[in-house]
């Protein structure tokens, strides 16, 4: 039975109970799209759907499924006939990918192939894909433009690059196929109402969740990985982008994908570089007390400095990041302190 042949255009959101996916579901629903989440909940929980409903007034459709399960994905597409998919589902730890590369190629590459096969069952694929700025590797020039050479330094980054290449080949073979590949810089923050944020299973390796743990007393001090980089204060510089800005960019990207075929690759960042110590200070302001930190050795594989050229996103999506670092820290801290929020870092 086809569930939704009419009604609002339905978007299949793989990984939709995850961090970026859940915020995007809120924005998609608020923009008038129907949402069908497909997630195997290996790094999230079904409870996120209630948080999405509490904010947007509607609970997305949900299928617990692994994106690598060809029969399950085909059945979902046959049943619901989504007009497009946003493909978040995947694994994302750089360090783990070095230890267990096959897990990364299996989840990220095989999962993408299976989803694409399902999405082409009833016509040409229409897809927005979650890629990462990590595909660039060590930058030759800054800000990073989309045409910069790709030299990812981990299996995670290479798994994203491989999928980007597959998507480009698909669009060459099928002129009606439509793909928007989004290269995220450093997503942080939470929904401003406090009920939705980053709730990974286990202790995350990223800076912002660690700041939250220190601010709330779950960790004694932040370890800052190196202060001898060629940057203004010696700590690494990144382009932190608020997850709500990212979510809004996905609505624009899915509209673009639905409007015109072809492949587009777009950076999603603010264009501003922020050092680790600047983020520590901003978070201390948000939580109202200083955050203890210690300088430790550099973390293997860290690039000193990179940030996006956001011009193409502005041109193609009409999207510019609007939220600054203090809003990112305020919203992250509010999420940690909201009693109804689903989990909090660590
Ligand atoms: P997340 O782990 O919070 O969300 C991913 C979701 O996908 C989870 O709900 C997980 O349960 C689900 N999932 C994983 N493997 C699956 C599978 N095989 N089948 C079905 N569901 C599966 O991660 P996120 O931060 O929301 O990232 C979303 C996407 O964005 C990922 O593809 C990630 O690589 C990419 N990305 C994230 C960042 C970041 O810093 N958060 C940066 C760049 C790119
Ligand atoms: N850092 C610390 N202490 C910590 C954690 C991080 O000093 O406890 C530093 C890192 O050395 C780095 C900066 O904070 O200089 C940011 O580190 P993150 O781990 O938060 O983010 P990365 O830039 O290393 O990578 C993130 C995601 C990748 C994604 C990339 C895209 O983890 O998946 O952004 O730009 F690909």
Image: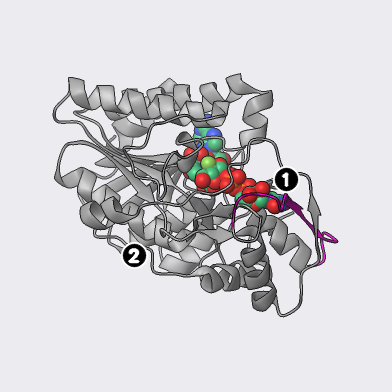
Q: Secondary structure at mark 2?
A: helix
Residue 169 is labelled as none
Magenta region, main secondary structure: loop
Q: Is residue 168 magenta?
A: no
Give the residue number, with chain letter if any, for mark 2. Answer: 30
Q: Nearer the viewer, mark 1 or mark 2?
A: 1
Percent x, y of residue 323 = 44, 69
Q: Is residue 253 left or right of residue 272?
A: left
Which quarter of the image is occupied by the C terminus? Answer: bottom right
Give the residue number, with chain letter if any, for mark 1. Answer: 202
Q: Secondary structure at mark 1?
A: loop
The residue positioned farthest toward the right in the image shown: 220
The CB of the residue at mark 2 lies under 8 Å from ligand 1: no
Q: Is residue 224 magenta?
A: yes
* Number of residues whose C-alpha sits closer than 10 Å to that of mark 2, classed few (under 14), some (14–19) or many (20 or more): some
The quadrant where residue 248 appears: bottom left
Determine if residue 56 is in view.
yes
Residue at (15, 46) in percent of width and height: 259
Of the numbered discs 1 and 2, the one sitting upstream in the chain is 2
- Closer-to-camera residue (39/251): 251
**Magenta stretch?**
217-231
Q: Is residue 302 left or right of residue 261?
A: right
């Amino acid at each position: 039975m086809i569930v939704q042949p009419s009604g609002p255009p339905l978007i299949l959101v793989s990984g939709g109970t995850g961090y970026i996916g859940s915020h995007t579901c809120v924005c998609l629903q608020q923009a008038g799209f129907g949402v069908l989440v497909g997630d195997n909940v290996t790094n999230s929980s079904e409870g996120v759907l209630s948080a999405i409903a509490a904010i947007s007034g509607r609970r997305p459709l949900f299928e617990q499924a692994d994106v690598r399960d060809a029969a399950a994905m085909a059945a979902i597409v046959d049943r619901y006939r989504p007009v497009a998919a946003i493909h978040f589902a995947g694994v994302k730890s750089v360090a783990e990918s070095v230890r267990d590369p096959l897990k990364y190629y299996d989840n990220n590459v095989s999962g993408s192939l299976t989803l694409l096969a399902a999405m082409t069952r009833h016509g040409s694929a229409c897809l927005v894909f979650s890629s990462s700025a990590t595909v660039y590797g060590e930058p030759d020039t800054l800000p990073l433009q989309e045409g910069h050479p790709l030299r990812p330094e981990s299996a995670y980054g290479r798994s994203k690059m491989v999928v980007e290449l597959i998507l480009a080949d698909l669009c060459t073979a099928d002129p009606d196929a439509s793909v928007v590949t989004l290269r995220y810089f450093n997503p942080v923050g939470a929904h401003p109402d406090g009920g939705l944020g980053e709730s990974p299973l286990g202790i995350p390796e990223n800076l912002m969740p660690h700041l939250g743990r220190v601010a709330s007393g779950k960790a004694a001090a932040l370890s800052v990985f190196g202060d001898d980089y060629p940057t203004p204060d010696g700590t690494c510089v990144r382009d932190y982008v608020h997850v709500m800005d990212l979510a809004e960019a996905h609505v624009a990207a899915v509209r673009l994908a639905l409007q015109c075929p072809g492949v587009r690759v777009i950076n999603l960042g603010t264009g501003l570089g922020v050092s680790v110590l600047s983020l520590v200070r901003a978070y201390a302001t948000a939580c109202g007390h200083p955050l203890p930190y210690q300088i430790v050795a550099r973390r293997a594989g860290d690039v000193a400095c990179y940030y996006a050229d956001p011009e193409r996103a502005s041109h193609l999506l009409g999207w510019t990041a609007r939220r600054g670092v203090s809003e990112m820290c305020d919203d992250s801290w509010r999420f940690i302190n909201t009693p109804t929020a689903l989990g909090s870092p660590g």
